[in-house]
Image (cartoon, rainbow, N blue to C red):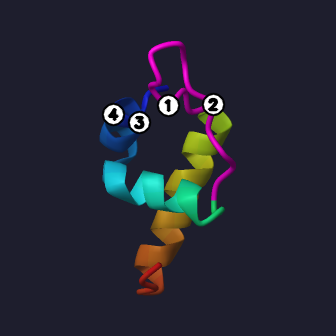
Amino acid sequence: MTITEVSQKFDISQDTLRYYERVGLIPRVNRNKSGIRDIPRKTAIGSNLLNVCAVQVYIHI
């Protein structure tokens, strides 16, 4: 999935996804030949869970 697809599917901003990757909350994401992030489904679901938990307990990551 591209970062745009994950962002739209789980209602997480692209900046938030990049931040989660940068600080190590999700694993480093491989990029395709064009340099676009290719986010595995498992990582996308983990990002959604992380975001939901942060929102539920009002944690600003």
Between discs 2 and 4, the one toward the N terminus? 4
In percent of width and height, residue 51 lies at 47, 64
Q: Which residues are magenta?
A: 26-40
Q: Is residue 8 left or right of residue 26?
A: left
User: Mark 3 — residue?
Assistant: 3
In percent of width and height, residue 23 lies at 59, 66
Question: Can you tell which quarter of the image residue 32 is in?
Answer: top right
* Tag 1 and tag 2, C-beta contact below 8 Å: yes
The residue shown at (46%, 85%) is 59
User: Mark 1 — residue?
Assistant: 37
Relative vertical location of residue 11 with respect to residue 20 in this rendering, above or below:
above
Q: Is residue 36 magenta?
A: yes
Relative vertical location of residue 8 with respect to residue 30 in this rendering, above or below:
below
User: Mark 4 — residue?
Assistant: 4
The residue shown at (55%, 59%) is 22
User: Mark 2 — residue?
Assistant: 30
